[in-house]
Image: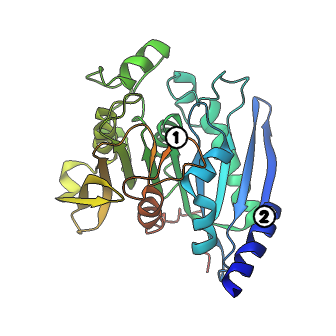
Amino acid sequence: MIRRLLARLRSWLSPRRIQVATYRTPSGALQYKVYRGWRARVGSRPLVVMLHGCNQTADQLAVGTHMNQLADRLGFIVAYPEQAAAAHPSRCWNWFNAAHQERDEGEPALIAGITREVIAQCDADPRRVYVAGMSAGGAMAAIMGHTYPDLYAAVGIHSGLPYAAARDAMSALAAMRGLRATLDPRYRASLFRAIPTIVFHGDLDTTVHARNSMQAIVQASPMPEVRGTEVVEKGEENGRRYTRTLHADTSGRITVEHWLVHGGGHAWSGGSRGGSFADPRGPDASRAMLKFLLGFTRAASPLEPARS
């Protein structure tokens, strides 16, 4: 009885903990929402930036991933940047456009600006900031991780694509079908600083081919000289089998995870039907991603003050 009353009270109060704001710059603007987890924490809290997919809103992503409920349980902050219809008729992030694949330009600059604004306004821990997304949002999360490794400690990609997988609409369609054998010529593995990354993908995804998940793993993996062991696990959860591949560095720490959901389509694995592009069957991607992401803390830069 007490638990039910508490649940109702939290449900009644939850909307008051959702803040809506707009981040503006001379070159553009983006609306975003912020949800502060219910559970109190000592000190600054982690921040997870969630990027929605095409034909999806921030609210639908929140419901489909049940990320706000997990924020209540674990005590972190969630930010949901929302693409404007004026920027793309299907509200897709323009991950395939070269103008939106570089640091301090286009949509990456706006998302990074939102991230920094939320850190400052919500007293989030600047060294425990993460970015994750679904589909086009997953592709943009890959871009954010590669262009802002000094801002995000780890990246989560669900049903998305690797950085520089396309440079225009035509090459985007080819990449989504898994037809491209190589990445954009600007991509050079030696120029990237490896960032911890977890990738989920359904092997029956007919919207974004699962080959893209493998390329995202290749990009995120450390260079051979600092690469450690690889472990493959097979299991079943919520009615779907999966193959989980763990990549460790030379110290033995898992820095890259790849989950291939067998029988899964273009939907958030283990999600809620109340949202969109979410499948309740399969391993719980939200829990797995959070377990992975929250395990990393970004190293402080020489100019960054120490925090307790």
Relative to 6, residue 192 above or below: above
* Residue behind mark 2: 17
Instruction: Give the quarter of the image for residue 31.
Output: top right
* Relative depth, front residue between 274 and 255: 274
Q: Residue at x 22, y 56 (%)?
A: 226
- Looking at numbered disc 1 in the image, what kind of residue is underneath it? Phe
* Residue behind mark 1: 277
User: Residue 288, position in %: x, y?
Assistant: 41, 62
User: Residue 134, position in %: x, y?
Assistant: 50, 42
**Circle number at residue 147:** none
Q: Residue at x 53, y 32 (%)?
A: 102
Left or right of 160 in this view: 252: left
Q: Residues within 10 Å of mark 2 (few under 14, many from 20)?
A: few
User: Residue 71, position in %: x, y?
Assistant: 61, 67
Sequence order check: which comes first, mark 2 or mark 1?
A: 2
Instruction: Give the quarter of the image for residue 305.
Output: bottom right
Relative to 85, residue 67 above or below: below
User: Dot 1 lies on which element?
Assistant: loop
Q: Residues within 10 Å of mark 1 (few under 14, many from 20)?
A: many
